[in-house]
Structure formats: C-alpha cells, structure tokens
Amino acid sequence: MNGATNASSTKQLISVHPEDLKFVFELEKQSFCDIKVSNNTDQDVAFKVKTTSPKKYFVRPNTGVLHPWDSCVIRVTLQTQREYPPDMQCKDKFLLQSTIVPPNSEVDELPQDTFNKDGGRVIEERKLKVVYASPNSSQDNADDDSVNNSTGGSSIQGHSSTGDVSFSTLNVIMLFLWFVAYNNIIY
C-alpha cells in the first residue's frame, strides 16, 4: 500500500463539528443547529447533505464546494412541529457526503452524478444523528457543542434547490431570521 492511499484512509476529506445535530425542541417553533464543515485537504471537496426526513428539515447550503483548508457553516432548521416526539427521542438521521472535485469547481457546475458511487468515484459518508433538548436543558450546554451564530469568512458557494441565491445573501437572510426569532418578534 502506498503512502497516499494510507494517508487518505486515515484522514477524512472533511471534519464536522459538532457531530450530533442538537435542536431545542419547542412546539410550534422553529429551531436550528449550525454545523461547521472543514476541508482537511489541499484539494477542492464537494459536499452534499441528505436526511431521512426532508420535509421536516431545511438545510442551507445543502450542497457546496469547499476550497483547500476552508470551512463553512451549514444551518439545519427544524420546521415547526405540532406534537412532541415519544420520550423526546428522534430517529431522524443526516448523511453528509463528500468527494474530491477538480480545482476551482463551482457548485452549480457539478455533474449530477458527483455523489453517485456507481461511477467509481470515492464518496466519503458521515452519519449525523439528531438529538432533541428541552428549552431548559439547552441553555447550560449552548456554548459547549454548537457553532451557532458563526459567520467566518469562508469562500463556499452554496446551492439552493429553490433558486439561485448566493451564500452571502443567504447568510444575511438567515441571520436576520434568527435575530427576529430570538427576540420573539414574530411569535
């Protein structure tokens, strides 16, 4: 086995923090969790986020390209729920796929089969589980295991399946929505 193969098998293309998606669960209120995704390589890496419950969560950006050693924040929003889950347990899961792409790749120019394993392409997968917390228990751990409200100067291009929105514009919109929700203006 050569050194390159050995190194790639021990070091993942991307790292994720936190590794669990923790949501403060309140009836009739949206909740969000930010995860920081970092490219651990000197190559461009594309990523895609999938979930077992796509109607329950809003993920932005759900697809992107990270340049070498760069990172970005992905916001996962839990839509409003009308009832509590049994025992506050959640069986929802997320899958974060990543693969090396050619230098200077743009997210809108990625081939449709970029994350298809059938083409012989190496696709790394990270499974992320969902954890619900009650509003009282979340305040104690808010700073420990989330990257909420991180902005950072990343050079990611995000992709929205509902239209062509730049990632920086999306950041401003999400920050405004968070601010409004945080201050209970819309409730």
Image (spheres, helix red, strand yellow):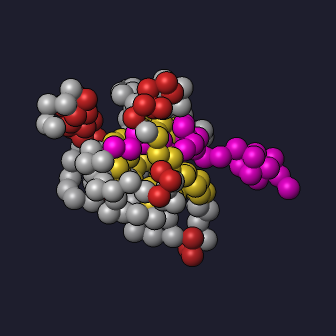
Work out which residue is located at the far left of the displayed protein and give it: 186
Residue sitting nearer the eye, 32 or 86: 86
On-image quarter of the N terminus? bottom right
- Relative to 4, does residue 86 appear above or below in the rendering? below
Give left or right: position of 109 versus 94.
left
Residue 115 x, y percent position in the rendering: 49, 64
Task: Determine whether 106 is above or below 172 in the image.
Answer: below
- Percent across and percent down for residue 57 are 35, 55
In the shown orientation, is residue 140 left or right of residue 62? Answer: right
Seen from this angle, which residue lies furthest right? 1
State the residue at coordinates (25%, 29%).
Answer: 182
| Residue 45 located within the stretch drawn in magenta | no
Percent coordinates x, y for residue 93 in the rendering: 51, 58
Residue range highlighted in magenta: 1-26
Residue that protrudes farthest toward the bottom in the picture? 118
Residue 75 seen in render: no
Q: Residue at x 70, y 44 (%)?
A: 11
Query: How many callouts does the rendering have?
Result: 0
Horizontal side of residue 170 vs 47, given as left or right: left
Can I make out residue 32 in this image?
A: yes
Give the x, y percent position of residue 40.
60, 38
Q: Locate the C terminus and report the quarter of the image it occupies.
A: top left
| Residue 24 falls inside the magenta stretch | yes
Residue at image location 32% in from the left, 63% down from the top = 55
Q: Look at 30% across and 54% down and name the residue there.
A: 81
Image quadrant of residue 150? top left
